[in-house]
């Protein structure tokens, strides 16, 4: 089976979450006999001069929805336009690894997608309310079951603070990190532009007040404070307690609900950072539920790709 992949989020340089998602999509496709002919980073891929020529060699179109398909974002609308062009060429359209929330335009065209796989059940309810069916499958960042070793002879660093996609929240996370005598870790280097003036002053003197988030950032960490969905997912994979800031969609609440834990324990508002004390921690029950969710995720993702191959290989 030959596929076209849309919304290749590796365009977000140094974004650990997007890198892992795309790596895992490629790995899962290879494992299930799906050859990716082309992977498009631009949402308006239909504008490429040779787009029609490329997709005519494909059997299927895979759209990596990630955090795009909510509130009728302009990026999501352009992805829809690309999907419609593919549909006109008779190609099945599979929307996977996606959020879905509070759409109007997208809801009107939800029938464009031959199959929908959402990352969490709140998005599943939104798809159902729009009159379509879908399957809930964990985020692609959970596909690789390997975890880094958290054992070290060095003492724990204790707290890892990770940025947000929103500049206002990132500035407050930066100040929180300074107060806790640690460095802010960012998923994108350009986020430095959104930091507090103190950070820019430090940069002027060649002092870098932040680090790029990598897998090694989680070494010797016993708690995570993050404004990033994928930093939460990685914390879950690694069994590290966390507090995550409220997002601009329900993806965080949805994943925690699907894991079977009360999300109110682990979601905080950015303004709570002013008075935040203590340290993130799991109850033993929540720790077991998260571990079970993480352990089941790879097989659920494999089942998704097997279903795609079985259902669409003859088309």
Image (tube, grey):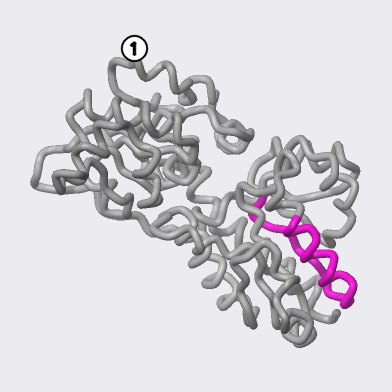
Most foreground residue, 227 or 290? 227
Q: Residue at x 56, y 76 (%)?
A: 31
The kind of secondary structure element at disc 1 is: helix
Residue 174 image position (x, y, % from top left): 31, 32
Inspect the magenta stretch and tell me whether residue 115 lies in it: no
Q: Residue at x 62, y 71 (%)?
A: 40
> Residue 198 is drawn in which quadrant?
top left
Q: Is residue 140 visible?
A: yes
Q: Is residue 89 magenta?
A: yes
Query: Which residue is depicted at the point 26% across and 47% down?
Result: 211
| Left or right for 156, reference 44 | left
Say if 312 sits above or below 209 in the image.
below
Which of the pair 291/232 is nearer the observer? 232
Question: Above or below — where is 110 with respect to 52?
Answer: above
Q: Is residue 69 above or below residue 262?
A: below
- Mark 1 = which residue? 275
Image spot of residue 261 (x, y percent): 54, 28
Residue 250 place in picture, x, y as percent: 63, 33
Of the 4 image quadrants, the one containing the C terminus is bottom right
Q: Is residue 245 left or right of residue 99?
A: left
In the image, 26: left or right of 110? left
* Residue 33 visible in rendering: no
Residue visible at 59% across and 31% down? 253
Write down the quadrant of residue 176 in the picture: top left
Q: Over which residues does the magenta segment extend?
A: 78-98
Residue 3 place in picture, x, y as percent: 69, 77
């Amino acid at each position: 089976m030959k596929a076209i992949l849309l919304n290749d989020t590796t365009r977000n340089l140094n974004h650990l979450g997007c890198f892992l998602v795309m790596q895992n999509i490629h790995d899962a496709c290879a494992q299930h006999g799906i050859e990716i002919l082309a992977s498009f980073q631009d949402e308006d891929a239909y504008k490429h001069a040779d787009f029609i020529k490329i997709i005519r060699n494909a059997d299927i179109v895979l759209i990596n929805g990630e955090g795009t398909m909510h509130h009728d974002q302009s990026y999501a609308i352009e992805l829809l336009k690309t999907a419609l062009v593919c549909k006109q060429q008779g190609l099945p359209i599979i929307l996977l690894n996606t959020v879905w929330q509070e759409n109007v335009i997208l809801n009107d065209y939800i029938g464009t997608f031959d199959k929908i796989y959402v990352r969490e059940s709140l998005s599943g309810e939104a798809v159902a309310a729009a009159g379509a069916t879908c399957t809930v499958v964990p985020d692609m960042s959970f596909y690789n079951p390997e975890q880094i070793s958290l054992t070290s002879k060095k003492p724990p660093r204790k707290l890892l603070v990770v940025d947000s996609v929103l500049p206002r929240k990132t500035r407050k996370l930066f100040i929180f990190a300074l107060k806790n005598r640690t460095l802010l870790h960012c998923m994108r280097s350009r986020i430095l532009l959104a930091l507090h003036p103190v950070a820019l002053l430090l940069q002027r003197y060649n002092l870098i007040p932040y680090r790029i988030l990598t897998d090694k950032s989680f070494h010797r960490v016993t708690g995570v404070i993050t404004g990033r969905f994928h930093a939460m997912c990685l914390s879950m994979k690694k069994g590290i307690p966390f507090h995550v800031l409220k997002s601009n969609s329900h993806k965080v609440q949805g994943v925690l609900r699907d894991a079977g834990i009360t999300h109110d324990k682990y979601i905080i508002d950015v303004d709570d950072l002013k008075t935040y004390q203590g340290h993130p921690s799991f109850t033993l029950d929540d720790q077991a539920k998260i571990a079970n969710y993480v352990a089941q995720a790879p097989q659920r993702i494999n089942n998704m790709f097997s279903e795609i191959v079985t259902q669409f290989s003859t088309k």
